Every structure is written in C-alpha cells, then in structure tokens.
Image (tube, coloured by chain):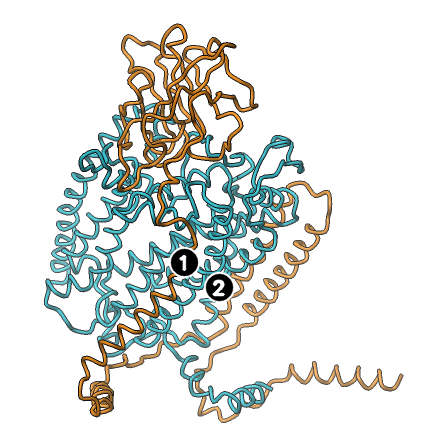
Amino acid sequence: MIRRLVRFVDQRSGGAPFVRKALRYVFPDHWSFLLGEVALYCFILLVATGVYLTLFFEDSRSQTVYHGSYKPLQGETMSRAYESVLHLSLDVKAGLLMRQTHHWAANVFLAAILLHVLRVFFTGAFRKPRDLTYVIGLAMLFTAFLEGYLGYSMVDDLLSGMGLAIGYSVALSLPVIGANLGLLLWGGPFPGSPSFIPRIYIAHVLIFPLLIIALLTLHLVLVASRHHTQFRESPKTTEKQVVGIPAFPGQAPRSLGLMFAVFAVLFLLGGLVQINPIWLWGPYHVGEATNGAQPDWYLGWLIGALRLVPGFDLTVGGYTLVPNPFWGGALFPVVILFVLALWPWAERRVTGDDAFHNLLERPRDNAWRTSLGAAFLTWIFLVFMSGSADRVTVWLGLDYSAQIWAYRVLIWLVPLLVFFAVRRACRELLAWEQIRSD
Amino acid sequence: MSRVKALLIAAVVLLLGRGRPKRERRPEHRIVPPGPADRRAENLVLLLFGGVTACGVAFIVFYAIDKLGHETQWLGLALGLAFALLTLACIVIARRLVVTEELPEPYPEDHPDEVETIAELIDESGSRFTRKRLVTLAGAGALGTLGLAALTPAASLGPALDTSALKKTPWRRGRRLVDESGKPIPAADIEAEAFYTAYPEGADRELIGSPLVVVRIGPGNAGVVAYSKICTHAGCAIALYRKPTFPDTQPGPALVCPCHYSSFDPAKNGKVIFGPAGRPLPRLPLEIDGEGNLRAAGGFSGPVGPSWSGVRR
C-alpha cells in the first residue's frame, strides 16, 4: 500500500530522492533549538484562528447604534467594525474562544521569536554562513510587531483607537515627509478616510501574512540548506559534521508533540484566561481616552520610549523640524533593528574572523559579545519597564514623574554595570572550568 | 445475504491477518535499527488516543448545548486537553515506540567551481556588447522609471501633497460649545475642580480639531478656559485632570494625557509642565452670548493635535 502510494507520487513528481533525504535530515538535540519551532506553530494557529475571525469581521468605520445583547453598551454610537467584534465575542458560539486564542497566540508568537533571536545571538549562531538567515529572521520579528499592532488596531475599540492615534503621530513626526506620509496612509487627517480600516484590515489578513510566509519559507530553506548549528558535545560533533536525530522516525513525534503542546497551551489560555475584553473598553471616539492605557506586551518598549523622552520638538525658527514622537516611536526601534541586523558584519570586521562556523559558542565563550549584548538588552528592557511606571504608581503609590526621572538616568547607568558584571562572570566561569579540568 | 456474509468474513480475515507478525524482509538490510516491542507503551498510546477522542466529542457536545454557562471556558478546556493528550501520546511514541538514532551527517560546503562557472557564463554571454556599462545603466534607468510609474497610483491613497487639511478645525468665532448630548453649556455651570468635554455645535465630532476640555481656573466668566482636548504629543485625548487636594504643598492643576502623561498647565496657556509633549496645548478663546452660553471667540492659538515636520508653532 505504502509502496504503491510512494511509487505513484514519485512517478509523477520524481520527488523520491528528495523525500528520502528529507526523512533522514538530522536535528541536533538541544531545548533552545525548539524556540523557533514554537514560533512556527504559533503562526500556524494564528492563520487557522485568524481565518475564522475574518468570516465575522466587518472592516468598516461607518457609525451605527448598538442594539445587541450586551446591555452596558445599549444605544451607544460605534463603528461597524467594533460592533462586529462585539457580536463575534458575545453572541457567536466559540467566537470568543477563537478570538482570545488568536490574541494569546500573537503574544506567544512574538515572545517565541524574541527568545529565538536571543538564543541565536548569544550562541553566535548568526555567524557565517547563517548571517542572511538571521537577518531574514529579524525582518520577520519586525513584521510581526507591525502585524500584531494592526490586528488589535482594526477592532476600533477605545484602546485600539488610541494606539492608532499614536501610530499616526509617529508617522507625522518623520522628518520632512511625515505629514505627507501620514495623510497618504490614513487617506486624510486622523482618524482618516472611511477606507482606512479596510486598508489596515487587508494589510493584517493578507499583505503582512504573505510577507511573513515568504520570509518564513526563505528562512527555513536557508536553515535546511546549511544544516543546523550544534554545541560541541562529543568528539563527533565538529565543524565538518553534524550529529542528531533524523527527521523520521526520531524527530517527527518530537516536533509534532511540541506543536500539539503549543496548541494545548494556547487553547487553554484562550478558553480560560481573559485577554483584551473589548466590551469593557467601549467604542473609540476621537475625544475620548481611557486611563492606564497599555498596549500588548510586545509594544511596551515603544510606549516606554515615547514616555521617557523629555518634552521637546526640534525646531528651526518657529517651525517644527522633528516632532517629539520621532525619537521614541521611530528612531529608537530603527536603531535597535540596525544594531541587531548589522551585528554579524560588525563582529566579523572587528574580530577579522571570516570562517564558517557550524559549532556554537556558549555565551561565556565570547565574553565581549555576551556582555555587550546583555548591556544592549538591559537598555531596551529598562525602557520597556518604564512603560509600566503608571501601573506602578497605581499599585504602589510611587510618584510617576520621579520614576520617569529615575529611568532617564538608569537606562544609561545600569547597562554599563551589566556590561562589566557579565564580562566578569563570563571570564570567571571560564577560569573555573579551567581549574576544574586541571 | 451471502454477500454480507462474504464481506464480514473478508473483514475478519483482514483484521486478524494484520495482527499476525509479518516475516521480516531482508532483515540484514534494515535502515532503521530494530528495537524490542513495548506493549505497555503501546497500550498507553491507545489510552491517550481514546482520551483525545473523548475530548473531541466533549467539544462538540459543549458546542451543541445551547444553554451552557461559561461556554468559552468549557470549549477551551476540551480543545486544550485534547491537544495536551496528543502531546503526551507523541512523547510516549518518541521515547518508547520509535528508535532514537543518532546519525552523523557532513555539513554542506560551498562550491567554488560552480561559482566560477556561473561567473564565466555571465561574463561570456555579454561579450558581444561593446558599451556594456551604458546599456546596463540605460536598462536600470528604464526599469527604475517603470517601477516608479507603477508606484505612482499609490498617490491616490491620500492627499499627500496638500497638507493644509491638517490645520483645519471647525471652530470659528461665534460657534457654540455643546456637551456630549448636544446641549449648550452655560458659563456659570462650569465648576472649579471639575473637567468638562465640549464639542462644536453642528460639526463633525470625529475630527482632531473638534473636542475641547473646559475647566475653571478662577471666579467669574473670565475664569473659564477651553483647550483642544487632543494632546500635542501623540494625538490621544486629554482624559485626566489633576487637581491638588492640598494646594499649599502639591503641584497645581494640570491637564494630563493618559497615553504618555504629557501634562499641561491650564492657568498658563496650556504650557507643558511634564512629559514628552513639545509644545503647549492650543487654547480656544471664549466668549459668552446673551443667554450666558459659551461660544468660541475665534480659532485656536496654535495647530491642533500632533506636530508634523514643517508646521509653524
């Protein structure tokens, strides 16, 4: 039976040699190699639940008066987009499960990509011949940031409207072209033309997913063609030879198990842990805002940066040249993207090391990279934390402006300390290993 | 009837026939190394698959019951549990029912010869051109222009070249302020230590230039002031009003945006006193009509909403 099926396919595709090779493709075994897979499985579930959501969503900002089943919003004026998501969440069977699972999957997706990038960075997996794979991965990370932002923005609840207002202000703040670009994207001054919601809708459900799928395909093809990196674990694992479990039969149940585990966690979260209860936020109107507004976690670094920058616009003789949101909302993420993307080339330049690297370094093996990376990460993390200073004020009563001033100093001081501490730790660990082996 | 009987016998033979151990074909040439059978692990997998089936049924049942309380939770639990049991089944299969091999494989290398061949191929193909650079340049120019032309229709997305729309607001001299329900606002009704939202009468409320905050900073008609409700930093609505509970030691009143906590002083023409905003909140001059209601006495003191590159302050 199996022979007949395989023969049928091979005679029509000639794919047998390729499949035979693919089945015996080896996977080196280490838990940290699975983070990228987790992201992939999140993406699969995002597409599956997302398709379901599109069957109910109305991409329209035309205003309507709510007469649905949710009593507290009776008689409120709201957009059809928001009304359709209310209906999906509160009246459609399994609708809320799908929406919450989708939202949780987005949060875990970003977390998994981020941890994956950190793993790749701190083990030196980005070195030649995998620098291009790494840059494509970064492009996916930043596309995913935008994709997530558009997803919760198109619902048109009060929080998403505020997020769009901030996005519009960042677009407007770009030097020279800001106003033109903002008007182009929004189709007019904020909140934009009636076609704005359809625009971000099609971007969220078609353009960005296609972009992610294209990048993902390229990423996986490059990974497979250069084979996976590995740690130096035995005399058999060398720069010339990879050792691992073949895709079939060893790795297949492991990877499938991981996929089902990701699905299990996401459906349990989607069913049992509430996320983004949009009926509590209410519809968006330009003249309204809610207090204690927080974006999804993966945009926390941007709201932190927007809040930390001292109050000034760059001006030239009574005209604004660079409005304030540019620093935190545009320059900050672009600097981070560039530092990460150019790192492999910068490192090659500084170390003069142009060789192929299939063996990974442990973080301690490269004290300079690890300590610089840790300091850079601390800088971003502190900016991220400053985005929740208002919550700390509510919970602990700490003065908000005092916290912001503290952060403005600490984001420069703490990374410096982290740099020296981590570099020392790396060297001590190596020295300790040396003593133990002697 | 005999057909049914024949089918039944065929099915039994098939089922039992499957159960018998097959003769190993060419055992000396196995690809996957052999391992012992593990019936307990097999039973466990069967049990787990049974559990997955039960969870699937439960999901359908939960979906079908119309008056089920906490529907989302039950559905999520059923589906989550189903996948959790599938995970366990995969783990048992991976660890106890398939052989875990450790195979070495050489890393792929680069192909200097092929690279050289490709480069030669491209070089030699162009040997009939005498002005290669010029042709390349012209070709790049032509395709570039065509690409630009293909992008031009994107300009229809919005009024990209005419930024004057950014400065428009519905506020004119004499326009009445109304509250959320559309009623005019008597100046005498504006109380100290309170915060009011106002809109232009008979105009679109969903414009950045429309909503106002109205507060009282002193006694009498002159003590009522109105500002644009849209923060000059990032376009959120000013939704917080900080008023000191003990004015002797605490900072004065402030209009605060909840997005990034830009704070503006209503008593000092909307001056920025904290936060990232780069310019003051635009003030709307007020007048009071014969009926004592608030009206605009002109336009805003500056551009409303977030700044843009090139705006006059």
Q: Amino acid at mark 2?
A: Gly
Placement of A335 over or under A79, stated as above or below: below
Can you say whether A324 is above or below A243 in the image? above
Q: Position of residue B231 (x, y in %)?
A: 36, 31
Image quadrant occupied by the C terminus of chain A: bottom left
**Residue B67 located left or right of residue A165:** right
Viewer-proximal residue among B62 and A8: A8
At x 46%, y 86%, the residue is A15
**On the image, numbered disc 1 is attached to which residue?**
B154
- Please name whichever residue, A100 or B100, is drawn nearer the observer in this view of the structure: A100
- Secondary structure category for the residue under label 2: helix
Residue A411, which numbered label?
none
Check the image and name the residue furthest to the right: B1
| Disc 2 packing (10 Å; few <14; some 14–19; many ≥20) | many
Q: Position of residue A334 (x, y in %)?
A: 26, 51
- Tell me, what hue is chain A? cyan
Chain B colour is orange
- Chain holding disc 1: B
Dot in front, 2 or 1:
1
Q: Nearer the viewer, residue A369 or A285?
A: A285
Outermost residue to the top: B219
Distance, label 2 to label 1, CA atoms, is 46 Å
Q: Position of residue A199 (x, y in %)?
A: 47, 53
Q: Classify A380 as above or below A399.
A: below
The residue that mark 2 highlights is A257
